[in-house]
Image (cartoon, rainbow, N blue to C red):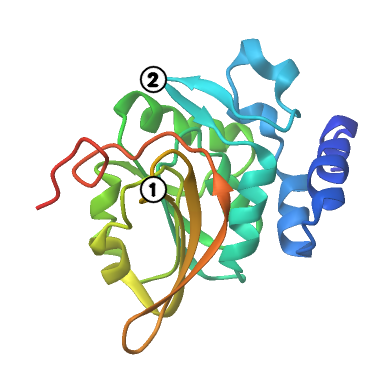
């Protein structure tokens, strides 16, 4: 089935023309209609390049920022990918459309309960989702080839790096130590230690739970 015209325009104007080049990422955006992941009253805004509220004080992220994160993850078919802060399920759907085997953790029960319905509506039902503290990851399903953190944290929670396979990549927005802005980081797990790259400035809702701004990590 061909992508609807507004979705094609979104991909062309907001992603391709702004420098997103990965064919896997662009193809996934064309196969996943964002309108299935926003509240019904905001469907007319679904193809805009800005975040939209999804309830519980949370948002579905700006398409361009999601594309930057997915391109940085460099996902290949069959990879096991964990998303923390699954929200509406939009990034999980894009990961599945890329051919990944995604797992999603969402802290808020109301949002977590809606994700399976949204995924089924978008034609992507076979995605594992659970409600829980994202900073703890999903250890029963580890290790993961890739981890995507879709909420800003003071620092990357250590359990997530522990659950990342050697050679794996983690992408996360992290609070700047200088205050104000957040920084998007790409971390590659090495045999001894971690390689860290600063990708861009960003703005995300905060991570909830023990490893969030107001939490107390064990």
Residue 129 point in image, percent of width and height: 38, 45
Report the label total: 2
Mark 2 residue element:
loop
Residue designated by label 1: 178
**Which residue is painted at 31% across and 63% down in the image?**
141
**Which residue is painted at 61% across and 31% down in the image?**
121
Mark 1 residue element:
loop
Q: Which mark is residue 56?
A: 2
**Which residue is painted at 34% across and 47% down in the image?**
153
**Which residue is painted at 53% across and 21% down in the image?**
53
Question: How far is mark 2 from mark 1, CA to CA?
Answer: 28 Å
Q: For residue 40, which quarter of the picture? A: top right
Q: Is residue 189 visible?
A: yes
Please determine whether, in this image, residue 111 is positioned above or below residue 75: above
Viewer-nearest of discs 2 and 1: 1
- Tell which residue pokes out farthest to the left in this image: 218
Dot 2: within a 10 Å radius of its alpha carbon, few (fewer than 14), some, or many (20 or more) residues?
Answer: few
Q: For residue 1, which quarter of the picture? A: top right
In the figure, is residue 118 to the left or right of 22? left
Please determine whether, in this image, residue 100 is positioned above or below residue 68: below
Q: Are marks 2 and 1 in contact (CB under 8 Å)?
A: no
- Tell which residue pokes out farthest to the top in this image: 41
């Amino acid at each position: 089935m061909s992508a609807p015209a507004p979705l094609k325009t979104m991909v062309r104007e907001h992603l391709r023309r702004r420098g997103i080049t990965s064919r896997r990422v662009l193809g996934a955006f064309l196969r996943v209609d964002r309108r299935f992941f926003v509240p019904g009253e905001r469907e007319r805004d679904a193809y805009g390049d800005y975040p939209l509220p999804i309830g519980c004080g949370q948002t579905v992220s700006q398409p361009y920022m999601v594309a930057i994160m997915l391109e940085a993850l460099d996902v290949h078919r069959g990879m096991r990918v964990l998303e923390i802060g699954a929200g509406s399920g939009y990034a999980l759907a894009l990961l599945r459309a890329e051919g990944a085997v995604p797992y999603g953790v969402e802290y808020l029960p109301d949002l977590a309960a809606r994700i399976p319905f949204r995924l089924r509506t978008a034609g992507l039902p076979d995605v594992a989702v659970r409600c829980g503290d994202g900073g703890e990851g999903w250890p029963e399903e580890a290790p993961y080839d890739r981890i995507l953190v879709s909420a800003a944290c003071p620092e990357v929670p250590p359990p997530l790096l522990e659950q990342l396979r050697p050679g794996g990549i983690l992408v996360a927005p992290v609070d700047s130590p200088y205050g104000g802005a957040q920084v998007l980081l790409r971390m590659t797990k090495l045999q001894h230690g971690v390689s860290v790259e600063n990708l861009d400035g960003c703005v995300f809702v905060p991570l909830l739970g023990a490893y969030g701004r107001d939490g107390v990590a064990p």
